[in-house]
Image: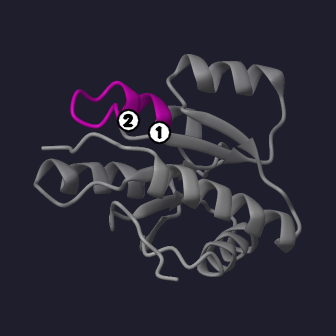
Amino acid sequence: METMSVSVDSILIVEDNSVDLDLAIRAFGRCNLINPLRIARDAEEVIALMQRWEEGEPTPTLILLDLNLPGLSGMEVLRQIKTHDKFKTIPVIMLTSSGDEEDIQEAYLLGANSYIIKPMDFGRFRELAAQIGSYWCRVNTSPKYV
């Protein structure tokens, strides 16, 4: 059976922890998604990407954003994406180790589309990656960014 996808747009993973990033890359790799993964390790890299998107580089179909980043926090990155006229409709999933109720509340108030606490074992992370890929990259229809 052939794997089908509506989009071949990328998934942007914003993660500074090498172990968590490796876990995510391996988990998504096992899901047979056709969506390429792009990586940013901190807020400054995301801001630089946003500038390139402004200049016409394709935007990601989905952003997986860690809360705890060096420098500007994931919340500040979320704020900048969701207040940007052109990029505010890009789905952002907070993928973090924090289960703090205040963090969850703030993320949703800032416009997060989902808040997921990272599983720490590979099997559960792989299941999560498959669910994310299935819904956000195959089922969900996102607007095009021009």
Where are the magenta residues, as a range?
78-89
Q: Does residue 103 appear left or right of residue 144 in this picture?
A: right
Q: What colour-coding does the image apply?
A: one colour
Q: Are marks 2 and 1 in contact (CB under 8 Å)?
A: yes
Q: Secondary structure at mark 1?
A: helix
> Which residue reaches farthest right?
121
Residue 131 in percent (x, y) is at: 66, 56
Q: Secondary structure at mark 2?
A: helix
Q: Does residue 43 appear left or right of residue 60 in this picture?
A: right
Does 48 sit above or below residue 93?
below
Indicate the amino acid at tag 2. Answer: Ile
Instruction: Tell whether position 19 is magenta.
Output: no
Residue 53 in percent (x, y) is at: 21, 52
- The answer, for residue 73, to whether it is visible in the render is no
Does 82 sit above or below residue 128?
above
Residue at 61 percent of width and 26 percent of height: 107
Give residue 132's quadrant in the image: bottom right
Residue 98 in percent (x, y) is at: 80, 40
Around disc 2, counting alpha carbons within 10 Å, would you say few (fewer than 14), some (14 to 19), or many (20 or more)? many
Q: Which residue is mark 1?
A: 77
Residue at 12 percent of width and 44 percent of height: 146
Q: Which residue is mark 2?
A: 81
Residue at 45 percent of width and 61 percent of height: 11
Residue at 45 percent of width and 60 percent of height: 12
